[in-house]
Amino acid sequence: MVAGTATGELNKEELFYLGGNANNTSLSSVNRGSFPLRGFPSNAFSGNNLLSFSAEYRFPIKSVEKKIGFDWASVFLDRISGTLFLDAGNSWEGNFIPFDQNIHASAGAELHFKFKQARGTPLTLTIGAGKSLTGDSAFRFYFQTGISF
C-alpha cells in the first residue's frame, strides 16, 4: 500500500502518476512519482494525492533447470512461476482528507521466466495481462524484463 500527498505550487514533474505495469517508466521506480495500476494505461491518473494498493498471490509452475542456446551461451531457464494480482487506487487533485474519490481497480495474471547466467545476476522475463474492474476496457497486455528478486 502506498499513500501520499503534496502541497503547494506543483509542476507536472512533481505530481503523482498512477497506471500501467510496474516498470512502465524505467528499470527502477525508486524516487519516481509513477506507480503501477496494471490493467490501465500508463499514467492514466494524476494529481497531488495518491492512494494505491496491490495484493499478489505468487506460485511456482515448473522448475526447469535447463540450458538454452548453444555451447558458448551459458544461459539457463531456471524456473517458471505465476502471479495473480488485484490492484486498486487513485491519484487526484485537491484535499487528501476527506477522501471522496472513486477507487479504480484491476485484476490479472503474470507468467515469470527466471533465467540464470553462468556468473551473473538472475534475469526475469515477465508476460502479463490486466483488466480494469471499474471501467469498460479490454485486457491490457505487457512485457517486461528485470533483475530477479
Image: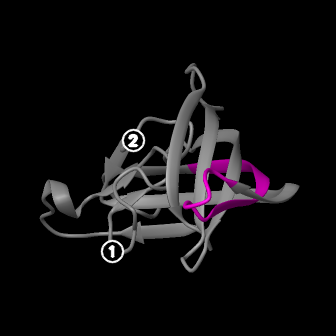
Residue 81 among magenta residues:
yes
Nearer to us in this view, 123 or 6 = 123
Q: Position of residue 80 (x, y in %)?
A: 77, 53
At label 2, which amino acid type do we have?
A: Ser
Q: Position of residue 82 (x, y in %)?
A: 78, 51
Figure quadrant of the N terminus:
bottom right
The residue tagged 1 is 31
Q: Secondary structure at mark 2?
A: loop
Q: Quadrant of residue 25?
A: bottom left
Q: From this viewpoint, which residue is outermost toward the bottom?
A: 119
Nearer to us in this view, 39 or 51 = 39
- CA gap, disc 1 and disc 2: 17 Å
Residue 102 among magenta residues:
no
Q: Is residue 113 above or below residue 105?
A: below
At label 1, which amino acid type do we have?
A: Asn
Relative horizontal placement of residue 124, taking residue 78 as reference (left or right):
left
Q: Residue drawn at (78%, 54%), measured in percent from left and top?
A: 81
Q: Residue drawn at (42%, 69%), measured in percent from left and top?
A: 4
Range drawn in magenta: 68-88
Q: Secondary structure at mark 1?
A: loop
As drawn, the label of residue 80 is: none
Q: Position of residue 100 (x, y in %)?
A: 50, 49
Comes first in the chain, label 1 or label 2: 1
Q: Residue drawn at (62%, 40%), measured in percent from left and top?
A: 128
Q: Position of residue 118 (x, y in %)?
A: 60, 75
